[in-house]
Image (cartoon, rainbow, N blue to C red):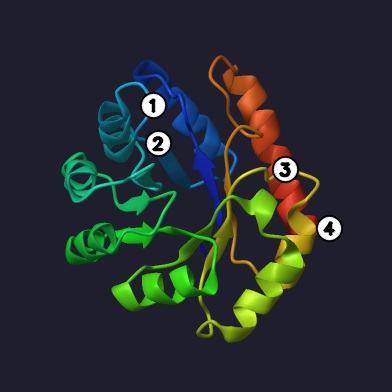
Amino acid sequence: METLPLIAILRGLQNHEAIPIGKALVRNQWHLFEVPLNSPSPLKSIEAMAASLPQALVGAGTVLTTNDVRNVHAAGGEFIVSPNFNVDVVYEAARLGMVCLPGVMTPTEAFAAIQAGATGLKLFPAEMITPPVVKALLAVLPAKTRLFPVGGITFNNMGPYLAAGVSGFGIGSSLFKPGMTVSEIETNASKFIAAYARRI
């Protein structure tokens, strides 16, 4: 997260694609891979990527229950991301030593998630949380709280969020969609790195 805090959200990833796409992203300096649990065979993909890409942090998205957390951990996943804040999910992830990014939208949810032990916060859906709102939220949250806008993030709208103080982003369909070639994904990955570096 210190070098390139961009989480590749690989929704719809097929198991046979996991390692080729993971290796392609690693070649392009991406090291945070999220396989949402509503993808085909997500635990198999997580297991394959975690075993084959030791330089990457592999985890799951759309994690809704404590059983989901345990299944991801058993598959070798090291972090979980949720679209919502569920205190039991955060507690279980913390108990297992996993990075945990619950989804929040309001200050009430954000403070509750931090108190429960969340590693950072997924701001979701980002389309409804503008950079000025992010700046206001960061003004009251504990210092160094990690915020990751997710939803509608593109090459062109990262700058204002970075200026507002976010830590990174979760990037989905602008990076990867089912059916894309490895070459297309690598092109998108490079564009996001350039946009992150420019901070515009």
- Packing grade of label 2 (10 A; few <14, some 14-19, many >=20) is many
Badge 3: residue crowd in 10 Å (few <14, some 14–19, many ≥20): some
Question: Image quarter for residue 169?
Answer: bottom right
Q: Residue at x 66, y 69 (%)?
A: 134
Q: Secondary structure at mark 1?
A: loop
Marks 2 and 3 sit apart, C-alpha to C-alpha, by 19 Å
Looking at marks 4 and 2 on the same chain, the residue that comes earlier in the sequence is marked by 2
Q: Position of residue 156 (x, y in %)?
A: 81, 46
Q: Which residue is mark 1?
A: 39
Q: Measure how far apart labels 1 and 4 are at the Cα level.
A: 32 Å
User: Tag on residue 35?
Assistant: 2
The Cα atoms of the two marked residues, 2 and 1, are separated by 7 Å
Asked if residue 166 lies left or right of residue 70, the reply is: right
Residue type of the residue flagged with mark 4: Ile
Q: Residue 159 location in percent, x, y?
A: 78, 59
Which kind of residue does numbered mark 1 sit on?
Ser
Amino acid under label 3? Answer: Thr
Element type where label 2 sits in the image? strand
Disc 2 and disc 1 in contact, CB within 8 angstroms = yes
Distance from disc 3 to disc 4, alpha carbons, whole Å, reads 12 Å
Query: Three-letter amino acid code at disc 2?
Result: Val
Query: Contact (CB < 8 A) between labels 4 and 2?
Result: no
18 vs 72, left or right, is right
Of circles 3 and 4, the one toward us is 3
The residue to which callout 3 is attached is 154
Query: In which quadrant is the C terminus drawn?
Result: bottom right
**Which image quadrant for residue 130?**
bottom right
In the image, which is nearer the foreground, mark 1 or mark 4?
1
